[in-house]
Image: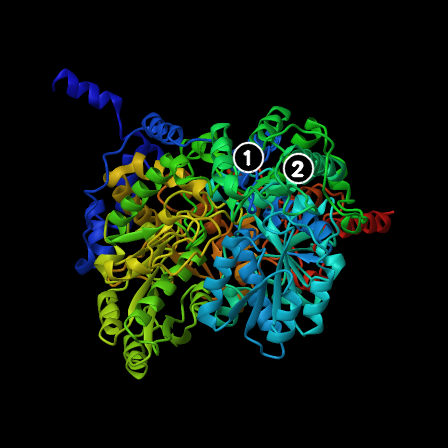
Amino acid sequence: MSDLATLAALEDQGEFIRRHIGPSEAEITEMLRVVGAASLEDLVSRTVPGPIRGADLSALPAPVNEAGALAELRALAGRNQVKRSLIGMGYHGTRTPPVILRNVLENPGWYTAYTPYQAEIAQGRLEALVNFQTMVTDLTGLPVANASLLDEGTAAAEAVTLAHGQHKGRSAVLVVADDLHPQTLAVVRVRAEPVGIRVVVASVSGLADAIAVERPFAVLTQYPGTEGALRDIAPEIAAAQAAGALSIVATDLLALTLLTPPGEMGADIVVGSSQRFGVPMGYGGPHAAFMAVKDGLKRSLPGRLVGVSVDAMGAPAMRLALQTREQHIRREKATSNICTAQVLLAVMASMYAVWHGPEGLKRIARRVNLLARLLASASRFPLRHEAFFDTVTFETGAETDAVMAAALEAGFNLRRLDGAVSVALDETVTREELDALARVLGGAPGTAKGGIPQVLERRSPFLQAEVFNTHHAEHAMLRYLKRLEDKDVALNRSMIPLGSCTMKLNSTAEMIPITWPGFSDLHPFAPASQAEGYIALIRQLEAWLCAVTGFAAVSLQPNAGSQGEYAGLLAIRAWHLSRGDTQRDVCLIPSSAHGTNPASAVMAGMKVVVVACDRDGNVDLDDLRAKAEQHKDRLAALMVTYPSTHGVYEEAIREICATVHERGGQVYMDGANMNAQLGLTSPAAIGADVCHLNLHKTFCIPHGGGGPGVGPVGVAAHLAPFLPNHPLLAEAGPETGVGPVSAAPFGSAAILPISYAYIRMMGAEGMRRATEIAILNANYMAAQLRDHFPVLYRGAKGMVAHECILDCRGFGQGGGVLVEDIAKRLQDYGFHAPTMSWPVNGTLMVEPTESEPKAEMDRFIEAMVSIRAEIRAVEQGRADRKDNPLKNAPHTAAEVMSSDWSHPYTREQAAFPLPWVRAAKYWPPVKRVDNVHGDRNLVCTCAPLEAYAERQLQAAE
C-alpha cells in the first residue's frame, strides 16, 4: 500500500458509519448465528423479495467524516447573506434565551423524546405543553388551545376545515379579509378547492357586505393585518356570527400582550404562530403554530391536546386528552390528518414565556411598539395606517424602488407593497439600526406617533399561573428545565423501540449546524439571492432523495409526514384532472394503514374504499382485484405502506401495483417504513408513482417529543409538474404546481441540514449497511423473544422486516394481563414501550433500528423475558391476578419508599426487577394515569393543575 493510500485509510472518512450503527462486527456475526443466516447478504435474500431487490445509489457521494460534513455545511451557511429582515408576514427576529437554547433546543433529553403516548414517562414535556396551552389561551382569550400545529398557514386551513364541519347550514363559502398574510391565503385556497369550498376575498371595508351576500360558514381575518393595520374587529366578528358563520382570527401572540384578545371580542377560533417567542426564523421553520377555540369546539380541535388527570394514587398527572378524535382512531372521519406537530418548538416558546413572565413579555412588546412609533415619526413619507403594533407601512409611491435599494444597502430587508414599503420591527432591532432605518426613510426619530388605539388596549391580565412568575433567575430556570427533563424517557436514557417510528440515532454532528446564524436567521421571504447556500443545500438534498427513491423529482416543502401524504395525493389528483379524468376520486386503502392515510385522502377530495388484509397481514389480493375492478372508472389511487405496517415485505407488491395501474389508478406509497428500503430497493423499483418520506424517521431528524418533522414527497416524472409550489418564491416548485401545502416555500428548512449531514456521512455504502442492520436487529429480537411472545407476522421465508409484532392477546384469558400492563411494567425497567395495539389490537410492535448496540437490545430482551415470567406467575396462580407488579405498574419512588407497603410482592421486585436496573434506575414520576377521568373532567391549563395539587395537600392534612 502506498503512503497516500495509507493516509487515506488513516483519515477514515467512513468513520461515522460505525458510530451510527450500533452492533460491532463481532456482534453482527453472533446475531446472524442466532437468526440462522450465513451473512447479511443471506439475511437480505431471505427477507426482501427477489424481484424488487436492487437499488442504484451511485449518484450519492462517498462518505465523509463528521469534520468533513460540518465543513461542507459551514461553507453552505456562509453562502447565505444574513440581513436584518424586517419583512414581517408572521416571521420576526427574536432572541432565543441562551438558557433555553442550550438546555432545550441543543439538549437530547428534549429533542430525542417521542410523542407522549406513554404519559407516565413523559410528564416533563407534557407539563411544558400545558404551559404552552395556557400561554395561548391566556393571550387569545379563549378557553382551550391545542399543543401546537405545523405553521400559521396550515393552522388557518385547519380552522377552516373545523368551521366547515361545524356549520349546520352547509354553506361551502369562506369569506377572507384581504389583509390576511398572502401565504396563509394561498395555503387555505389549496386546502379548500379539493373539498368544494369556495374562497371569497373581500376588502376590509367591504367585509360586512360580503358576509351579508355570501352567507359563509366562516370568516377569516388577520389581527393586526398583514400590512400592520390595527382595527376593531369586534363588529366583523358579530356580523359573521349573525350570519351563522364562525369567526376565525389569525393573530400575533406578542401583539396580544398589549391588544384586546380576539376571544374577548367574541372570536370562535384563533390561530397563529409562536415563532417570535424565542424560535429562530430558520428560513421558514420549524415553528409551533397554535389554535385556540371556544369550549364547544374542543372535541373537533385538530392536533394533540394535553389535559390534566389523576394517577392511580389520585395525584395530579398529565396525558394526551380526547384521543378518540384523532386520525389514528377516526381515520377517514377525522377532522384532520395531523400526526406529528411541533412539540420541541412549542416547548421553546412556552419556556420563553416562563423565562420572561407577563411583565417581561409586555416590556418586549412595548419596546417593539415604541420602536415602530419612533420610526413612524422619522419618515418623510405618509403612513398608510395610523394604528399599528409593530408594522408600519409608508406610502413611498414612485420612490419605492429607491427606498428598497437604500434599505438593502444599509443591511435591511423590507417588504415591498403596491407603491408602499412595510417595516416590521422586532425585539432584535437596536437603537443604531433604528437610526439607520430612519435615514433610509429620510428623517430622524422624533416624538413617537401612531400606535395602539385606546379602544384596543388590553385590560385583562394574562399568565397569572405560578410557573410564569417564578423562574426568572437563571439558576431557577436551569433547574426547572432539568426537573422536567428528568421526568421523561428519551433516547439519551434508553432505547425507544417504537414500531413504525424509527427512533434511531440523532447524532450530535447532525444537530450542530441548525443553530448557526447562516441557517437560523434567514427570513423565508428574503430575496432568493440571499439564500444561495440554502437553495444549494435544498437542491442537493432533493437530488440525493431522488437517487434513493428512484423518482424524478422531490419537494421538500411538506413540513410533516401528513403534509407529504397530502401533497402526494394532490399531485395524483391534479394529474388525473389534467387528463380530463375528473371522475377519478376513489382511493383504495388497506385496513392496516396508518390513520393519516384515509384522513389525507378525504382532505384531497377522495372517497375511501377499504381493502381487506389476509390472515398473514398482507393485502388480500382477491379483495383488491375485486374493488379495483368495481371502481375502475373512478379509481384514483391506492395507498400502500412498504414494508407493510405488519412488518413484512409483501411478496406480491408488484402485482398489487400492477392491479391498480391496469385500471387507471396511481400508487401512493407511505414512506413510514423507508428505513427498510434504503439501498436494497426503492419505491420506484417496486412500482409506486408517489412516496412521501419521513426525514424525522429514516433521515435522522429527531422526533422532538412530537415534532418537528419533514415529509418530502417524491414523484415519478409524469407527476413532477404537480408538486407543491409557492406564490412568493418561484424557486419553491414548478410553475404548474398545485400551490403551497406549507406556509413557507421550503417548509421547515432550518432542520434540513440534519438529513444532509446524515446522507453525506453515510454515503451509499453506509445507508445500505444501516438497512441491513435494521433488518438484522429486528430479526434478532424476534428470534430471542419468540419462545416467550408469539411473533404475529413473518415473510414468506420466515423473516420479519425491520420491525416485528409480538402478540400479547393470549395473556388476558390466562392471567388477566393486558398489553397495557406490559407497557407500563417496562417503565419500571427504564424502557419506553414498543408501539402498543397498532396495527393490531393487543400487540406490541418492536423496531430496534440499526443504531441500538447489542447490549441495549439484550437488556430490553431480558426485561421482556422477565415480564413474561411475571405473567406466568399470574397464570399459574403464584401471583395475585389483581395485585401484582404488572397491574400496579409503574411503581414510583414515593410508593416504594412509603412506610405503607401492602402488596404480596416485595419492594425490590417492584423497583429493581433485574440487577442492572439498580445501576441506573429511572423512577416514573407518577403512577398509571387515569385517561377516563381526564376526559370526563377536561382541564388543559396550568392554574387548575396547581389547584389540583392544593386540593391534594388539603386532603393529606
Q: Where is residue 697 in the image (x, y as percent from the top left)?
A: 40, 48
Residue 457 makes an appearance in the image: yes
Taking 901 as reference, is 843 left or right?
left
At mark 2, the secondary structure is: helix
Question: Furthest residue to the front?
Answer: 398
Residue 617 makes an appearance in the image: no
Taking 813 as reference, is 474 left or right?
right
Q: Is residue 210 above or below residue 437?
A: below
Residue at image location 48% in from the left, 55% down from the top: 868
Question: Furthest residue to the left?
Answer: 1
Residue 432, quarter of picture: top right
Q: Where is residue 323 in the image (x, y as percent from the top left)?
A: 59, 63
Residue on which the image places disc 1: 920
At mark 1, the secondary structure is: loop
Q: Label 1 amino acid?
A: Ala
Residue at image location 28% in from the left, 42% down from the top: 767
Residue on which the image places disc 2: 376
Q: Do the residues labelled 1 and 2 touch (CB within 8 Å)?
A: no
What is the C-alpha distance between the residues marked 1 and 2?
60 Å
Q: Label 2 amino acid?
A: Ala
Residue count near mark 2 (Cα–Cα under 10 Å), binned few <14, some 14–19, many ≥20: many
Query: Which residue occupies the foreground of this view, 956 or 742?
Result: 742
Q: Is residue 208 above or below residue 625?
A: above
Question: Furthest residue to the bottom?
Answer: 630
Query: Which residue occupies the foreground of this view, 186 or 274?
Result: 186
Taking 492 as reference, is 136 left or right?
right
